Amino acid sequence: MNKILMVSPNKCTDCRTCESVCYNDAVNVISIEDNDRTLSVSVMCMQCEDAACLEICPTGALSRDASDTVVVNADKCVGCKMCVGACPFGNIQYSNRKKKIMKCDLCDGSPDCVKYCPTQAIEFVYGTESNLKKKKILASKFKTLFE
């Protein structure tokens, strides 16, 4: 069974440690203000089952590795940025400095954002039915904040 990243916004203190330890700058932290509260949420690649980024890539630069993680082959990437536009979550970035696509690759199965999060707001857990359900519930809560 594959593992997934789970974020608990109520545990996040907006310290941005996850951003600072991400070796490929693939983690973004967003703060959402809702009435009298501010929630911080780490946003990283969701490793979608039906990954739009993977489907749209014209050169095959995006593929799944043995652990089913969507990874980038920088040698095949031509910088067209079609995957950036295809990602419904905005979790793929193009680095002008590096001239390549940047996205979470789960640090070869040991995500640094998880290891160094001082509040355990980010966890790397098995994608059980229960965990996937929790993730969908959280996503639907955030969706309503933007409507």
Image (cartoon, rainbow, N blue to C red):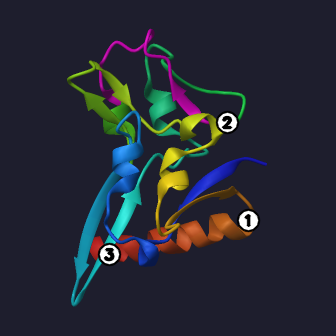
Instruction: Give the labeled residue for mark 1.
Output: 129
Q: Is residue 12 left or right of residue 46?
A: left
Query: Mark 2: few, some, or many residues within 10 Å (few <14, many ≥20)?
Result: some
Residue displayed at 28% across by 29% down: 94
Residue 110 point in image, percent of width and height: 62, 43
Residue 26 point in image, percent of width and height: 38, 40
Magenta-colored stretch includes residue 73: yes
Residue displayed at 31% across by 37% down: 85
State which region is magenta. 68-82
Residue 89 in view here: no
Instruction: Give the labeled residue for mark 3.
Output: 39
Q: In this view, does 27 lie to the left or right of 65?
A: left
Instruction: Give the labeled residue for mark 2.
Output: 68
Query: Mark 1: few, some, or many residues within 10 Å (few <14, many ≥20)?
Result: few
Q: Vertically, is 43 above or below 136?
A: above
Disc 3 and disc 2: Cα gap in Å?
Answer: 30 Å
